Image: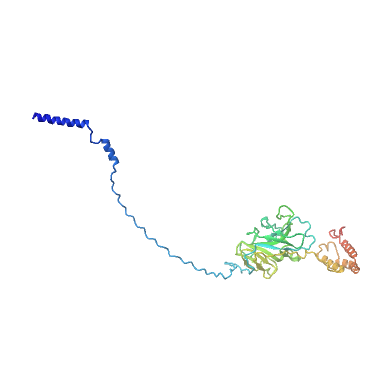
Amino acid sequence: MQLRKSLFGLIVLVLILAACGGDDPTPEVTDTIEAAVDTPVPTEAPEETPTQAPEPTTTPEPVEEAPDETDESDPVSSEPTDSRFPAAELINDEGGSVSITGEVTYSNPFFTLGVAEPVVILEDQAGFVDRNEHFLMPLASQTLGQITTDFFTSPFEYSVALPIEPQGTLRDVDNDDQENTGVQVFAIAYWTNTFGDPFLEERDLSGGGWSTAYASTEVSDDAETEREIVGGSFLIFAPDGQQGFPSGFGEDGLLFTEDDPIVQVPAGYTIVNLDSAPFTFDRASNPVIDLIEPESTALVDYSDLSYSEAFEGFVEQLKKEYAFTEYKELDWDALLEEFLPRFEAAEASDSNEAYRRALRDFSWRIPDGHVSGPQV
């Protein structure tokens, strides 16, 4: 029994020594921890959230465009949509003026004397509309043209390119007792620029007013209607299609007065011919307008008459136009009776010298240094 216990103890001792001295097959704690970290932990699959199916979209039905009821073959009407007056009857309706060309004919020998810088311009007619003889046309309103041929050879030609929107003075001329925008009214006019910059100032304009010669307008020579515009052409500009303008002079024969018949004019530029009854409203894009030399300014040519006929015509002109007849107590009929025989004698002898001496002696009988100076 004792031997069995000793043998059992020996076996236990051998096992203990073997465990302490040999390789321990048991893994270390750190290895176990690392192994646990490196080993992926199985995770549960996430619950799938059911997605809502998209709602079906509907394709919009095509919208049919309303048919164009405008007949392209029909001409476009120039009559305003909101007429306040009868529409102006238009000719050459090309949309309004773009440029203006024309000629300036002069016969007066003094026309080119003392000219510093000849110009053709758009002349603002607000002075005439207001009957203000001291009106100074604004610089911005003065559209300058070009003289395109020799100024010193009559007739010379000009050209004016019109601005898209002119800067003239607006005047309400429709006589409807309402305040309206109005129109800009221009004449095409010749001037000479003597002072300052290229534009006309008060000294150039002789104090203001409006042109009475060499313009697109014709002015009355009658003493009762002196300086009244009685013919020719205006260039007007309407900012819209709702403005009125006279279509005639009315019963009083004057323009821009209460009895003027009124028509509605289209927007933009229009040439108004004052020589027709009713006025003509021309919408040509490139109109030709010749400027007018009035009879009172033009040279009175007696060269086709005989000496005696020319003298009689000259005396008749002096009776009508010489300003100081009464002041200087001139009796033209008596002078005609006195000098006519000398002109008839010069004519009979075909003597130019006798004619010139008779004309000299006649001028000396007029007490006026402008016509009877020592140069005669």
Choose between 60 and 266: the one closer to the eye.
60
Residue 232 percent location from the top left of the image: 71, 66
Residue 157 visible in rendering: yes
**Residue at the image position 20 percent from the left and 32 percent from the top:** 19
Choose between 142 and 130: the one closer to the eye.
142
In the image, taking residue 181 as reference, residue 150 lies left or right, namely right
Residue 289 percent location from the top left of the image: 70, 64
Image quarter where the C terminus lies is: bottom right
Image quarter where the N terminus lies is: top left
**Residue at the image position 71 percent from the left and 61 percent from the top:** 158
Residue 246 location, quadrant = bottom right
Residue 13 percent location from the top left of the image: 16, 30
**Colour pattern:** rainbow
Residue 149 versus residue 90 in the image, above or below: above
Residue 74 percent location from the top left of the image: 57, 70
In the image, taking residue 96 as reference, residue 105 lies left or right, namely right
Q: How many marks?
A: 0
Residue 38 location, quadrant = top left
Residue 131 visible in rendering: no
Residue 337 location, quadrant = bottom right
View extreme (left): residue: 1
In the image, taking residue 315 as reference, residue 182 lies left or right, namely left
